[in-house]
Image (cartoon, coloured by chain):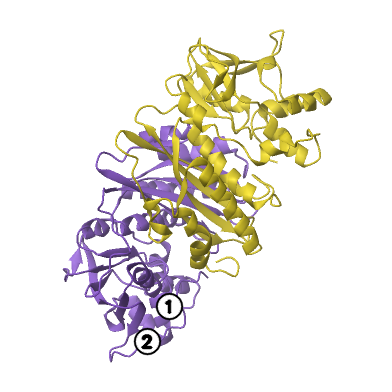
Chain colours: A yellow, B purple
């Protein structure tokens, strides 16, 4: 029981309206939600927990915290080629979270429910003496047997990534004053409000041999593909797509290459495919950045084919 | 990243073995889990978060903390008449959680997976500076259209509860030295290791007009049935089934009646039905404790039909 409102009041006032569009949520007034994937579909479930000052900054705008918590989970659905259906949310909040903050948080959820066609299906609301913590489980659906997996990359496949890489990690540094953003705040925006590539994930069904979302950092995540596929992945560093803001930051400080390739928080899709692909799929630019070979691990090569050594190998939160 | 092990190592070493029996978990090596309810079934999803020193005591045995976290969620599935399929688990742990604690915690999960025929389908493992926090989403399945709901109680129905009421709340007091337990530690055991009434929930399909699990306290939970059903519930206090340990505690201190009826943590099923029911269903004793009338709210009546006033109206955690 955090704050002046009890759990029941808080759910009724703030959260039940978010469930009104989803009959299976039963108005958040029952013990559990009912979800029917439909004949020929299976459900896809993922969960991510976010802790203040680990996964988001506690003074970030509450609506953006809410939307990021949803979107990092939706990004996992995108990586499976699934379409989103609903989500559950456990809020574990200290009593310092007041009603104005909660109202803004709920507005963020409502905005993204509308944008992604999902609804709240269930949840829990408890108090803590620790930092604000969110646990989201996103539930999607995919045609039976059509889910994208990490394990299907084969020697000879090409390696692709959507959008641009590194903006999220640079954005966190920009918010801390350690990197110069562009006048539009592009980098900070990418950190605060990632864009789950749901339409692209759907379009990759039948095209991609393996896929995942880039959350731990491009190199670490391609390492997951290499591990589960039993193959080696070669990344040609000059082919990794960068935004103009990231290019400017990198020109000013070449050491930021490690942040770009290993910093995480991109929420782009990385994937492999046996064939060449168009430059754009589902409205999203995609770039071929390398190839799959026999072997294991990930090698990042420079323009001359020499290995690039990065100081870090995976996502370490701030 | 809590503790000396990174997230990936922690998942691979401690949690991936818990997913080995469930193909849709994809070895916890993919972005999400795949769950196929089967033709004619729909999925049932519930989530509960538990915070150290709010929902469990941080020095409780780690295996019992794990099992309780699972069981309070399974109890919600029981209340819907569902059978359990799998669960996701987000652990939000401070760095004081060491590997020995984690190993015992995982042993508890494994024990209950075996007891209830479920497996870990996915999860997340993050660090916090706050108290240890768990967020579980339990996923079950129920034949389409057969889920038990809170909203179907009708005037003329009888009100039932399974097992015995109040032991869990008294058990918490017993663990704090405030109530005398029996020599077997019955009350403490009910608090530490609740028993989800899954078989009973299944048996209530087609028999119960409304059902829920008693987690907030018998009176508050029957209030939920009254609210969602648009009816009034009368409880005859002398018909509420008590264990001999609870009867002894109540005899020593009559003020404990409020704890028994409103203290929560029972995880029995409370339900309504239009007909009389046998004394035992699915191996669980059930007691008729009252009736449904037109109106609203819950009234607790004594032997003479006079209202019993309780000092509290719902579950307040310790």
- The answer to which quarter of the image holds residue A185 is top right
**Mark 2 belongs to which subunit?**
B
Disc assigned to residue A179: none
The quarter of the image holding the C terminus of chain A is top right
Q: Residue at x 71, y 25 (%)?
A: A243
Q: Earlier in the sequence, mark 1 or mark 2?
A: 1
Rendered view: B308 above or below A79: below
- Residue at the far top in the pictured view: A304
Which residue is identified by label 1?
Answer: B259
**What percent of the width, then of the height, locates residue B163?**
28, 68
- Residue at the far right in the pictured view: A252
- The answer to which quarter of the image holds residue A197 is top right
Specify whether residue B237 is in view. yes
Rendered view: A284 above or below B99: above
Determine the secondary structure under disc 2.
loop
Which residue is identified by label 2?
Answer: B308
**Mark 1 belongs to which subunit?**
B
Q: Residue at x 47, y 20 (%)?
A: A208
The quarter of the image holding the N terminus of chain A is bottom right
Q: Are marks 1 and 2 in contact (CB under 8 Å)?
A: no
């Amino acid at each position: 029981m955090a704050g002046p409102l009890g759990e029941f009041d808080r759910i009724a006032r703030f959260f039940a309206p978010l469930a009104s569009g989803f009959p299976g949520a039963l108005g958040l007034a029952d013990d559990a939600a009912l979800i029917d994937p439909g004949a020929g579909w299976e459900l896809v479930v993922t969960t991510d927990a976010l802790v203040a000052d680990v996964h988001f900054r506690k003074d970030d705008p509450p609506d953006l915290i809410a939307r990021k918590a949803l979107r990092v989970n939706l990004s996992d659905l995108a990586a499976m080629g699934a379409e989103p259906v609903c989500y559950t949310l456990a809020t574990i909040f200290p009593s310092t979270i007041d009603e104005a903050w909660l109202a803004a948080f709920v507005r963020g959820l409502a905005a993204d429910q509308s944008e992604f066609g999902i609804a709240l299906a269930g949840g829990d609301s408890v108090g803590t003496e620790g930092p604000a913590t969110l646990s989201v489980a996103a539930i999607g659906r995919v045609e039976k047997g059509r889910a994208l997996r990490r394990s299907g990359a084969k020697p000879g496949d090409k390696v692709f990534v959507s959008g641009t890489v590194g903006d999220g990690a640079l954005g966190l540094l920009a918010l801390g004053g350690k990197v110069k953003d562009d006048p539009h705040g592009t980098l900070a925006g990418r950190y605060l409000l990632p864009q789950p590539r749901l339409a692209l994930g759907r379009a990759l069904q039948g095209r991609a041999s393996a896929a995942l979302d880039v959350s731990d950092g491009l190199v670490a995540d391609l390492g997951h593909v290499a591990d589960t596929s039993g193959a080696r992945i070669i990344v040609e560093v000059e082919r990794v797509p960068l935004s103009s803001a990231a290019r400017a930051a990198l020109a000013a400080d070449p050491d930021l290459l490690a942040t770009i390739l290993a910093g995480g928080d991109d929420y782009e899709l990385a994937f492999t495919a046996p064939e060449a692909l168009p430059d754009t799929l589902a409205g999203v630019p995609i770039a071929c950045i390398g190839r799959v070979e026999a072997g294991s691990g990930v090698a990042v090569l420079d323009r001359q084919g020499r290995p690039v050594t990065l100081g870090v190998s995976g996502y370490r939160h701030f």
